[in-house]
Image (cartoon, rainbow, N blue to C red):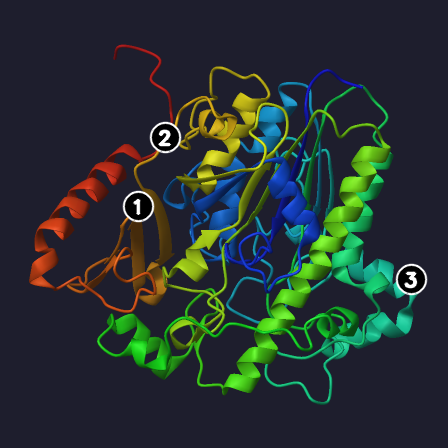
Amino acid sequence: MSKKKHIWLITTDQMRGDALGCENPAVITPHLDALAEEGTVFKRAYCASPVCTPSRASIFTGRYPHVHGAWNIGVSLNEEELTLCDHLKSFGYRTAGVGKMHFRQQLKTGFVHEAEEVSVRDRGRERDGTYFGFDEHHITEDNMMGEYLDDVAERAPEAAARLKKDLYRSEDAAGDVWESELAPELHQTRWIADRSIRVIEEHRSDEPLFLWSSFVDPHHPFNPPQAYAKLYEHADIPGPTGDDSDIEGRPEHLRLQKRKGYWPGGGEAHSRDSDHMTRLVRNYYAMITFIDEEIGRIRNAWKEKGMDDELLIVFTSDHGELLGDHGLLYKGPWFYEGLTRIPMILRGPGIRKGAVTDALMEHVDIVPTLLELIGIKTMPAGIQGMSQRSVASGDGVRRVRESAMTSYDAHDRGIHAKCLRTDRYKLVIFADEAYGELFDLESDPGERVNRFLDPVYREIKQQLMEMFIQRLMRDQDPLPVRQAFW
């Protein structure tokens, strides 16, 4: 086995930071709970953006959405950007990715609802033919088109036809909520695990391996296989934070969403009854339990291959899910904790076991943290994140950040917002607008009282504004590197 550490990055899509059993007893995640016990949990980790593509691009470049250019869904990551795979390959790693990538748009150009051709969506970069640096990739996105659906069609043609028709939508489905009759062994979650296991089993060289296992769920629709939904049949599910009345007195974009419906990213206001919301949350948790079980299977493959002892593992999600909080579902231009706080577990050589830290962490920190953990002292040019190795290792460093930043950019649809999260406060600024949001999370952890125009908080808001300006100045693109006096 290589003396270099193998790396396993695990991501989910739309999973809240409080959707782990080690934090929320209502969720069944024994394998992730065990991973948390073996490593360090960052309880204050925040996404780069509350929609998929910008955050995923930030995870893989260590750069902010306003710098790497993939500022919202429907926008592709610039092929010239260097990714985590590019950096790792320069240090001898073989790279493989399985599951949802979403570095490119999934629908065709022209704002139509027609799926992009897989050959176009998943094409290699012009400069080297790889998919953003992956030596091997097996992609399946939200619409399931491509390798996964082809595989199901070969194994079970009737199941593939039903997936194409209605995703096994049940007769008692309510909106995006139902329990699926699709057999677990044919499910997208199982396929992602199976392909990840195959990558591990077929890795026979002395090269260190980087594997990204990227699960599509618990993204809506909330439709777990029936067996997993049954696990939560009688579970006591806590209600959402806040309610639909929270929309009153809030920024205009919330009221626009209520009246008009859609912002790029999908979130919507809802007025569903408590029984519907309970079913929705149970199914959401059931999807996570299915993923947890498959993570256990992949973890066992690492062990059986003898590649587990020196294995670095990072578990996270691209963003959270509103899950009924404040009368809202899905994602979009909001910065509530349920949507922006993400799970973050680090495990492996040099990382404390059984530790939980409240140190702030961002998506952009993943790349420099992994590079430092494998022994790289000088970070490649252009990386904007901060290594969290010293925090995760227990070297006496409590934190490396004083704030975390999240952005939502849909300037083409009339909204562009940025959020600054400190230990106590959350400030949200909307471009070209006089309104904003300011929450005192110490006195108002549910984020229900907006202090943005409260004169009592005027000085605090001013201090946060100054901190935000300083961050935005520092976080401009550091590339290209200066190479001459003039």
- Percent of width and height locating residue 158: 89, 74
Give the left or right position of residue 155, taking residue 169 as reference. Answer: right
- Give the residue at mark 3: 154
Which one is earlier in the sequence, the residue at label 3 or at label 2? 3
- Give the residue at mark 1: 423
Q: How many neighbours does mark 2 have within 10 angstroms: few (below 14), some (14-19), or many (20 or more)?
A: some
Q: Nearer the viewer, mark 2 or mark 1?
A: 1
The residue located at (41%, 23%) in the rendering is: 396
Q: Nearer the viewer, mark 3 or mark 2?
A: 2
Q: How many neighbours does mark 1 have within 10 angstroms: few (below 14), some (14-19), or many (20 or more)?
A: some
Count of labels in the image: 3
Q: Up-down: is 167 above or below 103? A: below
Give the left or right position of residue 125, taking residue 192 as reference. Answer: left
Pick the residue in front: 351 or 212.
Answer: 351
- Give the residue at mark 2: 400
Q: Quadrant of residue 72?
A: bottom left
- Percent of width and height locating residue 171: 73, 89
- Helix, strand, or loop for circle 2? loop
Q: Are marks 3 and 2 in contact (CB under 8 Å)?
A: no
Q: How far separated are the C-alphas under marks 3 and 2?
A: 50 Å
The amino acid pointed to by label 3 is Glu
Give the left or right position of residue 339, taking residue 156 as reference. Answer: left
